[in-house]
Image (cartoon, rainbow, N blue to C red):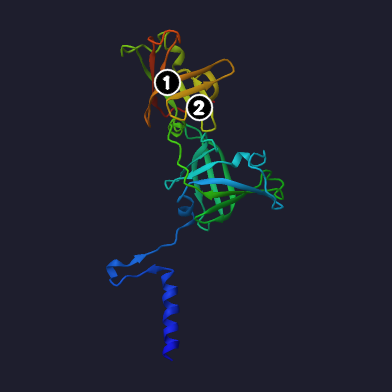
Amino acid sequence: MNTLKKLCYLSAAILLSASFISCSSDDNEIIIEQQTPSQVLSSTPWETTGAKDKSGNSVALTDASVAGYVGFAYFKADGKFAIYNLTDVLRSMGTWSVDAQGKTRTIAALNPDGTTIFTRDVEILVLNRNEFTYRIRPNSSDPSVYYDIIHTRTSHTEPTNGQITLASTPWETTGAKDKSGNNVALNDPSVAGFVGYSYFKANGTFKIFGLNDVLRSEGTWSISPDGKKRTLTTPTFTRVVDILLLNETTFTYRITPDASNPTVFYDIIHTKVNHKEPL
């Protein structure tokens, strides 16, 4: 009988230990709480490590059917996300959520001015501390075609070279200085061509408008891995400038009009603004 009682006590102890760990003093009791699906998703960075088609066959991550879903993903506890490709180039950013049952993840990719580029719902197949797998259906009119995108927990650090900061807001040119630190009027011919509203999008494209909202240039942008240079590429020119300051409120870069005479330069100052991108 004593043996039976001991077994019962042992079984009860094992069951209780799944919910909490108790020390000899109530003050030292440690409660282990189960994480919600949202907490699990935001608990770690994720790396795309595999993909399968509807037949369960592996699909190369470079295959056009899945390549747009491949990268490093960071789902922040504040409801924001950033996804980079496997070479650490920012691909999309915005807001995210997971339903309480952990069955659907929703992302809304945003423009710098806060408008929505797209919203995407995916079916979650696996979500635990080590794996996050969801199903995509490229053609909503043919749900029989789908791919499962597999992500694995990773320790890969999110890039800190300023991509997120530059893409997080529109920028307005609010000042310029010459090499001696003197203010230069924004309509001065030396700097007028760099003045306007800038929109650096997370998908690597940009548009710059004059202060009269007339489109001035568009193309692609990037920031060097060390965060020291920004490059613009358009059909007519490529421009590389030195970044002097880039934070949540200010973006300042240096232009050198004549590469053969680097002693003459101007610093172009931009400030965070709520100006909506002209249509």
x and y percentages locating residue 144 in the rendered image: 72, 50
Whether residue 207 is situated above or below residue 263 in the rendered picture? below
Circles 2 and 1 in contact, beta carbons < 8 Å: no
x and y percentages locating residue 112 in the rendered image: 47, 32
Whether residue 203 is situated above or below residue 121 in the rendered picture? above
Element class at badge 2: strand
Question: Based on the displayed image, in which of its 4 quarters is residue 272 positioned?
Answer: top left
Give the CA distance from mark 2 to mark 1: 12 Å
Question: Based on the displayed image, in which of its 4 quarters is residue 196 positioned?
Answer: top left
For the point 52% across and 23% down, the residue is 207
Where the N terminus falls, by quadrant?
A: bottom left
- What amino acid is found at the position of numbered circle 2 in the picture? Ser
For the point 51% across and 21% down, the residue is 232
Residue in front for this viewpoint, 81 or 19: 19
Residue in front for this viewpoint, 188 or 178: 178
- What amino acid is found at the position of numbered circle 1 in the picture? Asp
Q: As drawn, is 268 to the left or to the right of 223?
A: left
Q: Which mark is residue 250?
A: none
For the point 45% across and 28% down, the residue is 170
Whether residue 125 is situated above or below residue 159 in the rendered picture? below
Where the C terminus falls, by quadrant?
A: top right
Element class at badge 1: strand
x and y percentages locating residue 103 in the rendered image: 56, 55
x and y percentages locating residue 138 in the rendered image: 67, 43
Q: Residues within 10 Å of mark 1 (few under 14, many from 20)?
A: some
Q: Residues within 10 Å of mark 2 (few under 14, many from 20)?
A: many
Mark 2 or mark 1: whose residue is earlier in sequence:
2
Whether residue 138 is situated above or below residue 262 in the rendered picture? below
Residue in front for this viewpoint, 183 or 260: 260
| Residue located beneath label 2 in the image | 222
| Residue located beneath label 1 in the image | 242
